[in-house]
Image (tube, rainbow, N blue to C red):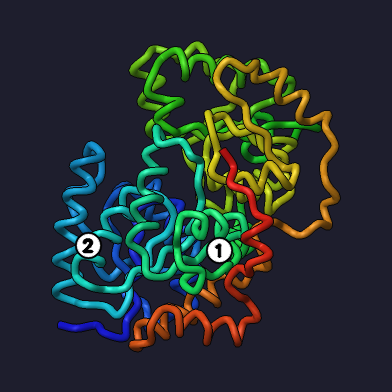
């Protein structure tokens, strides 16, 4: 069965669902949605589809979630190849830097199906990050690159990508954040034991392997959260919960207000009211910046320097005293909240859907980008932008 003219949208994790939901909505009946099964439980997938109103996927792979990385990618590659062979789309859209992105880009490319990479061009220049390898794989295989910012476009062009295949669209996180936060029905006060919002509080999320796969690293972060001079709402990712139990670090959570991962809309409602966020999530870096909430990033490196440049994020690397660093950051000057988000004007999904439809209908990627740019006013980066751009190291 052919679905030529359809746009296959592939996701497998919470961030992909959140950021691709606006694109799926824009595509409507032109979308053919595939869930890779990378995150297979309701807590991290089902609730987000419900929040964004995109329903169940057309296809879902089995046997992927919970497997080691190589096993995940190999199973997804085989499964997605079969899906695309049986129901061949006109283009495959992938988003971000997950194992799903790597597998879906490979499966489509090997079958000669055009690949569109949403949120293309992010770079941490840290190859120890699995996500960085996934970004590089997608960058090498994509036929069209939807860069969320000019900096991301510069990264791609400096790597030799034809500028005619790059479009600065903005980031779909802007649309997703504003849409989700309007759907929350849970009062912020209900997250606190006494039912009242304190004058200042922090929201914390930790889930990355570099922070959860060793007892010393995780203990350092938990103790740092305990040392913050304000109550801490700690939304505990399943991986982090398992690591706390495995390493016997329950005492290091004393004094923290623990909750399971909430629905996106409820989390963003809490985040918007917080004094500061402490997180290792790339999505939270963006969401906090859109909401103009300071975010302390607990990582070795970040592929989202725009949040730091905009003054809404700071990087706290291993060995840095977390409470002291957060206190210094909160004392630093914030930019004017009226300054626009570095992630765009909230029309990214409209631009992406327009290009994807044109390619699915048979247009060459460079032609599709020119046509869409003429209507949206969005252009590929100029020589001046590229020449003035710098590659963060």
Residue at image position (16%, 59%) is 79
Asked whether residue 347 appears in the rendered view, the answer is yes
Residue at image position (61%, 72%) is 347
Asked whether residue 48 appears in the rendered view, the answer is no
Q: Secondary structure at mark 2?
A: helix
Q: Is 158 or 328 nearer to us in this picture? A: 158
Q: Is residue 69 above or below residue 227?
A: below
Alpha carbon distance from label 2 to label 1: 24 Å
Residue at image position (83%, 46%) is 335
Q: Quadrant of the C terminus?
A: top right
Residue at image position (39%, 32%) is 128
Q: Which mark, by number, is residue 172?
A: 1
Q: Quadrant of the N terminus?
A: bottom left
x, y percentage for residue 325?
A: 70, 22
Q: Is 275 or 388 nearer to us in this picture? A: 388
Q: What is the number of callouts on the image? A: 2
x, y percentage for residue 118?
A: 46, 63
Left or right of 221 on screen, residue 275: right
Q: Which mark, by number, is residue 85?
A: none
Identify residue for label 2: 107
Label 2: few (<14), some (14–19) or many (≥20) C-alpha neighbours in 10 Å: many
Q: Are marks 2 and 1 in contact (CB under 8 Å)?
A: no
Q: Nearer the viewer, mark 2 or mark 1?
A: 2
Label 1: few (<14), some (14–19) or many (≥20) C-alpha neighbours in 10 Å: many
């Amino acid at each position: 069965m052919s679905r030529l003219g359809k746009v296959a949208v592939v996701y497998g994790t919470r961030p992909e669902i959140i950021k691709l939901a606006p694109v799926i909505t824009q595509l409507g009946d032109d979308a053919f949605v595939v869930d890779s099964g990378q995150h297979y439980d309701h807590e991290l997938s089902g609730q987000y589809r419900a929040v964004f109103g995109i329903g169940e996927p057309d296809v879902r792979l089995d046997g992927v979630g919970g497997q080691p990385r190589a096993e995940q990618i190999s199973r997804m590659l085989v499964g997605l190849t079969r899906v695309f062979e049986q129901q061949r789309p006109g283009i495959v859209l992938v988003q971000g830097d997950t194992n799903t992105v790597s597998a879906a880009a490979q499966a489509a490319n090997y079958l000669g199906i055009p690949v569109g990479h949403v949120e293309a061009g992010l770079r941490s220049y840290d190859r120890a990050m699995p996500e960085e390898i996934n970004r590089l794989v997608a960058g090498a295989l994509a036929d069209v690159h939807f860069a969320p910012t000019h900096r991301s476009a510069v990264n791609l062009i400096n790597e030799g990508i034809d500028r005619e295949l790059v479009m600065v669209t903005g980031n779909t996180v802007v649309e997703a954040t504003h849409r989700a936060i309007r759907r929350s029905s849970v009062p912020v006060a209900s997250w606190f034991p006494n039912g009242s919002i304190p004058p200042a509080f922090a929201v914390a999320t930790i889930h990355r392997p570099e922070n959860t796969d060793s007892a010393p690293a995780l203990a350092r972060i938990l103790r740092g959260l305990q040392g913050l001079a304000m109550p801490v709402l700690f939304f505990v990712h399943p991986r982090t919960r398992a690591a706390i139990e495995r390493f016997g670090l329950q005492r290091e959570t004393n004094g923290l207000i623990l909750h399971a991962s909430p629905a996106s809309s409820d989390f963003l409602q809490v985040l918007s009211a917080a004094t500061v966020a402490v997180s290792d999530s790339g999505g939270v870096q963006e969401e906090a910046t859109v909401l103009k909430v300071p975010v302390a990033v607990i990582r070795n490196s970040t592929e989202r320097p725009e949040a730091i440049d905009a003054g809404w994020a700071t990087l706290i690397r291993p060995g840095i005293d977390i409470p002291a660093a957060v206190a210094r950051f909160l004392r630093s000057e914030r930019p004017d909240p009226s300054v626009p988000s570095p992630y765009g004007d909230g029309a990214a999904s409209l631009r992406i859907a327009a290009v994807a439809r044109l390619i699915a209908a048979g247009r060459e990627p460079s032609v599709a980008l020119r046509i869409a740019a003429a209507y949206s006013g969005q252009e590929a980066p100029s020589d001046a932008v590229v020449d003035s751009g710098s590659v963060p190291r």
